[in-house]
Image: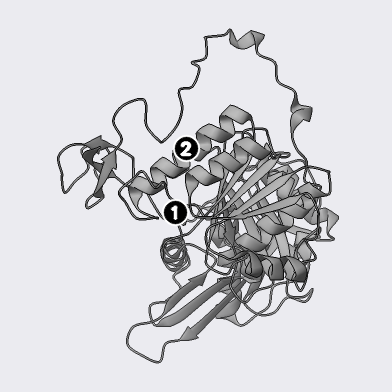
């Protein structure tokens, strides 16, 4: 067993400590770890090495995906679960990760598939109480409460389940390693051991991961590189709506999201996302509507803004659901191009429904809502703003514009503001503006 130093950001290994990683340049990320030397050890058995094959000779059957029957969940995974697929799912404590995985066991168990649920954090009695509350009573679900990675691997090899869930990867460990559970060494080696077992036997594997205060999966970044798919469970703790987002997916799009509602019986999929991100039909002062895209779907969102005279020396700048730097940039654009003095005003921007988005198509709607709040004048009902705004105040076209326009028209909106440079299909409901000065004039 040799001592090495391991970069938690990029996975670079070296025998000497350094304050700065020589590969990725990150400071303070070199952590001490251990490496197992030799081929024959307790970490695994000798695996038959594969032979090279021509890629055109390889066969793949898309029908081999395991469909859960929950459209929102299948959408995020790219159409279903693939044999040997390893998925890492993270989220804030109490967000509903264990609830989702227990319900996933029920969905798969109803298809006469065997599920092995391994828990290293809770006792069998605790999980049984939760399963009773969620009405998870399928006879094809098997529970194993242990912290030993080797014990889990043995159970997988003996029972040959159709799906394995580990709750959580930070709680399991390999006894052969002289490191505590959750350490870099244990996380890397335990994940590698479980991943190798899943790939060898062709069994899909779900790993629940803790997150740091920054909201990313705890442990070395290499964990996300090892697995096939990384999912994040998002949403306000007290909000009933939760968002499952794919940030990495080797078998599908990385921009897809799944929408769920937390009920007394667990998580239920949301079939109409347009209803949860709108407060009501009537537009208030400082409120504007936009259309964003997440993966293959488009839906309507509402932006609320409040511009008020600051009572203290330093004005407040608060953004919920949006990037703070994006907010600062849009305020500078507004002040520069429209000569609106905002340095003595508090500005609050909120993306309703608990959703977070970085879609540039929101820019035009944010500026429209800010103008509405400053002028104390509501925007005309059934109006949508879709466009990115440049630093010089020009309104730029966005991707999938025709799809966004079709979605808004289908929902009954009859005034759609887009970029004057966009090449969209002719429509009497579409209003083109080339810069925010034209937008300001149109809102008068």
Given residues 317 and 109, the one toward you in this image is: 109
Could you tell me residue 296's position as x and y percent?
A: 70, 43
Could you tell me residue 417's position as x and y percent?
A: 68, 56
Q: CA distance from mark 1 to mark 2?
A: 53 Å
**Would residue 198 be visible to someone looking at this image?**
yes
Pointer 2 residue = 193
State the residue at coordinates (77%, 54%). 106
Given residues 200 and 231, the one toward you in this image is: 200
Q: Nearer the viewer, mark 1 or mark 2?
A: 2
Q: Quadrant of the N terminus?
A: top left
**Residue 89, label in figure:** none
Given residues 275 and 348, the one toward you in this image is: 275
State the residue at coordinates (43%, 68%). 335
Pointer 1 or 2: first along the chain: 2
**Residue 392, label in figure:** 1
- Does residue 336 lie above or below 406 as drawn? below
Position of residue 418 in the picture relative to residue 212 (left or right): right
State the residue at coordinates (59%, 67%). 95
Extreme residue in the bottom direction? 311
Position of residue 382 in the picture relative to residue 147 (left or right): right
Could you tell me residue 225's position as x and y percent?
A: 45, 38
State the residue at coordinates (48%, 77%). 347
């Amino acid at each position: 067993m040799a001592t090495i130093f391991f970069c938690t950001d990029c996975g670079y290994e070296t025998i000497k400590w350094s304050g700065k990683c020589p590969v990725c340049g990150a400071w303070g990320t070199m952590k001490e770890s251990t490496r197992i030397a030799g081929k024959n050890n307790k970490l695994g058995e000798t695996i038959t090495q594969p032979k090279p094959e021509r890629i055109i000779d390889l066969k793949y059957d898309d029908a081999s995906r395991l469909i859960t029957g929950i459209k929102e969940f299948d959408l995020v995974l790219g159409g279903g679960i693939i044999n040997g697929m390893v998925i890492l799912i993270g989220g804030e404590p109490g967000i509903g990760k264990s609830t989702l995985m227990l319900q996933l066991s029920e969905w798969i168990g109803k298809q006469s598939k065997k599920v092995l649920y391994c828990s290293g954090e809770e006792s069998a009695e605790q999980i049984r109480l939760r399963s009773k509350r969620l009405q998870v009573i399928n006879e094809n679900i098997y529970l194993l409460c242990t912290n030993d990675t080797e014990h889990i691997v043995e159970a997988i090899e003996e029972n040959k389940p159709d799906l394995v869930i580990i709750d959580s990867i930070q709680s399991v460990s390999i006894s052969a390693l002289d490191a505590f559970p959750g350490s870099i060494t244990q996380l890397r080696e335990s994940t590698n051991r479980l991943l190798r077992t899943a790939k060898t036997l062709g069994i899909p594997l779900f790993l629940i991961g803790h997150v740091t205060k920054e909201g990313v999966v705890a442990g070395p970044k290499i964990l996300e590189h090892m697995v096939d798919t990384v999912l994040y469970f998002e949403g306000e703790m007290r909000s009933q709506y939760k968002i499952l987002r794919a940030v990495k997916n080797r078998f599908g799009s990385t921009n897809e999201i799944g929408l769920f509602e937390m009920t007394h019986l667990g998580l239920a999929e949301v079939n109409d996302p347009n209803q949860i991100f709108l407060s009501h039909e009537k537009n208030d002062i400082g409120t504007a509507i936009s259309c964003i895209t997440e993966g293959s779907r488009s839906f309507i969102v509402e932006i609320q803004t409040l511009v008020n005279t600051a009572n203290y020396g330093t004005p407040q700048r608060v953004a919920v659901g949006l990037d703070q730097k994006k907010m600062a940039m849009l305020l500078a654009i507004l002040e520069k191009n429209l000569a609106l003095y905002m340095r003595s005003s508090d500005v609050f921007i909120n993306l309703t429904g608990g959703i977070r988005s970085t879609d540039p198509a929101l820019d035009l709607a944010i500026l429209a809502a800010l103008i509405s709040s400053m002028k104390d004048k509501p925007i005309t009902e059934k109006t949508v703003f879709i466009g990115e705004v440049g630093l010089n105040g020009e309104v730029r076209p966005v991707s999938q514009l025709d799809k966004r326009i079709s979605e808004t028209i289908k929902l009954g909106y009859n005034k759609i503001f887009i970029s004057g440079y966009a090449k969209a299909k002719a429509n009497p409901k579409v209003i083109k503006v080339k810069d925010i000065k034209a937008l300001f004039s149109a809102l008068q």
